[in-house]
Image: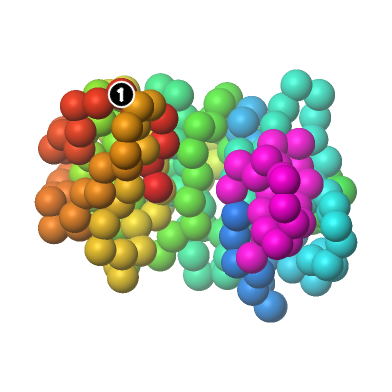
C-alpha cells in the first residue's frame, strides 16, 4: 500500500510519522492516475515507478498546486472528479494519453478539484453534504464525458465523494468531539445524483471514512 502527500511524493505506508493525505494499492500492469487541486490529471504506466523508494515523486507539480488524489487504474475504468461548484465529470481512463512521471499532466476542465475516484460502472459513489447528509449514487447514473466539459450537477454543498466498496458494511463519521459514529450500510440509501441524502449525524464532523 502506497501513501501519498500533498506535495506529490509517495512511499510505503509502513513508514511511520508521515502526513499522508491518501493511499492506494499498487497494481502490476496498470496505470497510475494523479489529480491535482487545480484540475490537472496525469496518467502514467506503473512501470515508470519503482514503488520501493523512501520518497518517490508521483508527478511534477506546478507552482501553487498540490496533489489531491492518486490511484492505480486500467483502461476499462473511469476517473470521476468533483469540483467546488457541485459538478461531477466522468472520464474514461483510455481517453488519456500516457506520459512520464515527471510531467504535470493535462487539464481536466475543472478549475478546482476537491475529490476524485477510480470506478467501474458497477460501483456506487458515496456523497456527503456540508450538513452531513449522505447517500449512495450508482456510477452508471452519470454520463461519460470529455475533458473540458462542465459535467453534471449533483446535490448542493457536497463536500465528500468517494467510491463505496460493495463489501463494506459501514462508514465511520469522525466528529470534532467525542467517539466516532458508525453508520450501517443499510441506513445509507441509493438515490439519484440530485437527490438529498439522509442525515448521518447531528454533530460537527472532521472526517468521513
Q: Label 1, secondary structure: give it.
A: loop
Left or right, 18 with respect to 111, comes to: right
| Location of residue 115 with respect to 163 vertically, above or below | above
Going 19% across and 55% down the picture, which residue do you hit? 184
Going 25% across and 26% down the picture, which residue do you hit? 203
Q: Could you say which is closer to the camera, residue 174 or residue 58?
A: 174
User: Which span of residues is magenta-colored?
Assistant: 1-22
| Location of residue 166 with respect to 206 vertically, above or below | below
Which color scheme is applied? rainbow
Residue 84 position within the rendered picture, expressed as x and y whole percent measured from the top left: 45, 24
Left or right, 104 with respect to 167, comes to: right
Q: Could you say which is closer to the camera, residue 162 or residue 183?
A: 183
Main SS class of the magenta portion in the image: loop
Going 72% across and 45% down the picture, which residue do you hit? 18
Left or right, 55 with respect to 204, comes to: right
Quadrant in the picture for the N terminus:
bottom right
Q: Is residue 200 visible?
A: yes
Residue 170 position within the rendered picture, expressed as x and y whole percent measured from the top left: 26, 57
Q: Could you say which is closer to the camera, residue 149 or residue 105?
A: 105
| Location of residue 29 with respect to 16 vertically, above or below | below
Residue 194 position within the rendered picture, expressed as x and y whole percent measured from the top left: 20, 35
Q: Picture quarter containing residue 3?
A: bottom right
Q: Is residue 41 visible?
A: no
User: What residue is pinned by disc 1?
Assistant: 204
Asked if the stretch drawn in magenta spans residue 13, the answer is: yes
Asked if the stretch drawn in magenta spans residue 206, the answer is: no
Residue 204 position within the rendered picture, expressed as x and y whole percent measured from the top left: 30, 23
Q: Could you say which is closer to the camera, residue 99 or residue 163?
A: 163
Going 54% across and 32% down the picture, which residue do you hit? 113
| Location of residue 73 with respect to 141 vertically, above or below | below
Amino acid at each position: 500500500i502506497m501513501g501519498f502527500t500533498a506535495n506529490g511524493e509517495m512511499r510505503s505506508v509502513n513508514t511511520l510519522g508521515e502526513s499522508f493525505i491518501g493511499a492506494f494499492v499498487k497494481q502490476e500492469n496498470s496505470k497510475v492516475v494523479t489529480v491535482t487541486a487545480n484540475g490537472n490529471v496525469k496518467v502514467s504506466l506503473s512501470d515508470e515507478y519503482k514503488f520501493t523508494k523512501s520518497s518517490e515523486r508521483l508527478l511534477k507539480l506546478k507552482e501553487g498546486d498540490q496533489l489531491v488524489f492518486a490511484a492505480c487504474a486500467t483502461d476499462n475504468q473511469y476517473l470521476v472528479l468533483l469540483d467546488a461548484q457541485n459538478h461531477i465529470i466522468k472520464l474514461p481512463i483510455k481517453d488519456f494519453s500516457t506520459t512520464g512521471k515527471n510531467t504535470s499532466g493535462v487539464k481536466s476542465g475543472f478549475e478546482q478539484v476537491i475529490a476524485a475516484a477510480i470506478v467501474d460502472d458497477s460501483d456506487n459513489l458515496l456523497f456527503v453534504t456540508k450538513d452531513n447528509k449522505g447517500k449512495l449514487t450508482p456510477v452508471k447514473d452519470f454520463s461519460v464525458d470529455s475533458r473540458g466539459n462542465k459535467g453534471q450537477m449533483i446535490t448542493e454543498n457536497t463536500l465528500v465523494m468517494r467510491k463505496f466498496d460493495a463489501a463494506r458494511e459501514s462508514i465511520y463519521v469522525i466528529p470534532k468531539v467525542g467517539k466516532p459514529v458508525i453508520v450501517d450500510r443499510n441506513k445509507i440509501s441509493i438515490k439519484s445524483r440530485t437527490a438529498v441524502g439522509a442525515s448521518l449525524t447531528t454533530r460537527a464532523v472532521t472526517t468521513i471514512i
